[in-house]
Image (tube, rainbow, N blue to C red):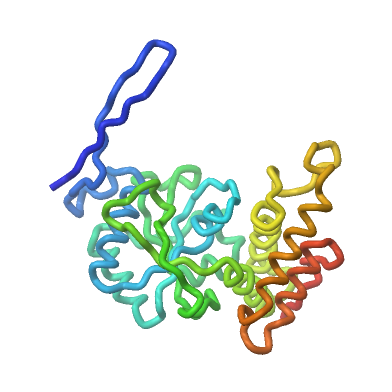
């Protein structure tokens, strides 16, 4: 049975109420008539019901970490051995397996390693959105680094009340670890550097625009922000980094305080 919620909105002309459906029950041939976030919600429910382990990744994860980005694609990581079954479930639901829009091709392996399922009726590159499944081995994450949290695809989900999320230091470590596998000028590396830069700016330094503007009031207390961010990274050093990867914490800390450059991080 579908559940509804009444939303009251205030405007200059007074108040009006509307009912929205919290958990619509579509036929599979009608699923793309719903908003993309609701389609993803239904897909997550069905995948979890089938025993699939889903890990929030990329845009949704970064938005959770204060990066103010519009979610174009809903990305999730699943254990390698579950990827085929998870993909079959999405196909059976009526989500078309698709080739992503041309603009996404510049991100290299983030395109070639993902299974893209369209969650919108629209196919134009300006409007299309996908639910993307990636193998756990590509993400470089470990199951021991995961926590259960409320999901980010909807403000409140009845269908999918919780999802696996990497710990904060694990997010940084996975990006830096991936950077070691790619040459400095490829599309995948460009995407990784961009992701890391935005996370440092918005998450660790808590900058409103993600970077330091000398004409902005934030520039006046940037030293305090650098110290606080450095202390956070240093606190992760004990028992957080994998054996032999302590250098990740050192490299990240150097980038945070400005004595290191993301462009010079180890690469292939």
Q: Residue most toward the top? A: 13
Q: Can you give x and y, in whole percent of width and height, for residue 130 in the image?
A: 42, 55
Tell me, yes or no, if residue 115 can be seen here: no
Left or right: 164, with 30 as reference point: right
The one nearer the camera, 48 or 205, is 205
Q: Can you give x and y, in whole percent of width and height, for residue 187 in the image?
A: 65, 65
Q: Residue most toward the bottom? A: 244
Left or right: 239, with 227 as reference point: left
Q: Can you give x and y, in whole percent of width and height, for residue 173 in the image?
A: 63, 73
Q: Can you give x and y, in whole percent of width and height, for residue 262 in the image?
A: 77, 66
**In which quadrant will I find the C terminus?**
bottom right
Residue at position x 32%, y 48% from top?
38
The one nearer the camera, 61 or 107, is 61
Left or right: 88, with 199 as reference point: left
Residue at position x 31%, y 61% from top?
44
Above or below for 215 versus 23: above
Residue at position x 25%, y 63% from top?
46
Quarter-wise, where is residue 252 in the image? bottom right
Tell me, yes or no, if residue 167 can be seen here: yes
Count of labels in the image: 0
Residue at position x 41%, y 47% from top?
123
């Amino acid at each position: 049975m579908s559940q509804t919620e009444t939303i009251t909105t205030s405007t200059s002309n007074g108040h009006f109420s509307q009912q929205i459906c919290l958990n619509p029950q579509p036929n599979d041939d009608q699923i793309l008539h719903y908003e993309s976030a609701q389609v993803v919600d239904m897909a997550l429910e069905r995948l979890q019901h089938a025993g699939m382990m889903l890990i929030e990744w990329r845009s949704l994860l970064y938005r959770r970490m204060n990066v103010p980005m519009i979610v174009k694609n809903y990305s999730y990581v699943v254990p390698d051995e579950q990827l085929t079954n998870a993909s079959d479930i999405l196909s059976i639901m009526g989500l078309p397996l698709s080739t992503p829009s041309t603009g996404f091709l510049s991100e290299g392996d983030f395109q070639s390693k993902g299974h893209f399922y369209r969650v919108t009726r629209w196919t134009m590159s300006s409007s299309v959105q996908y639910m993307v499944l990636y193998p756990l081995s590509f993400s470089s994450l470990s199951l021991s680094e995961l926590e259960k949290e409320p999901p980010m695809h909807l403000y409140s989900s009845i269908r999918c009340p919780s999802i696996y999320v990497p710990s904060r230091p694990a997010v940084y470590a996975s990006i830096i670890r991936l950077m070691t596998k790619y040459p400095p000028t490829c599309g995948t590396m460009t995407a990784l550097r961009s992701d890391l830069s935005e996370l440092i700016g918005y998450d660790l330094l808590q900058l409103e625009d993600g970077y330091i503007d000398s004409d902005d009031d934030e520039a006046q207390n940037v030293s305090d922000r650098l110290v606080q961010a450095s202390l956070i990274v240093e606190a992760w050093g004990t028992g957080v980094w994998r054996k032999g990867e302590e250098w990740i914490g050192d490299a990240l800390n150097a980038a945070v305080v400005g004595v290191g450059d993301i462009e010079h991080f180890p690469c292939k």
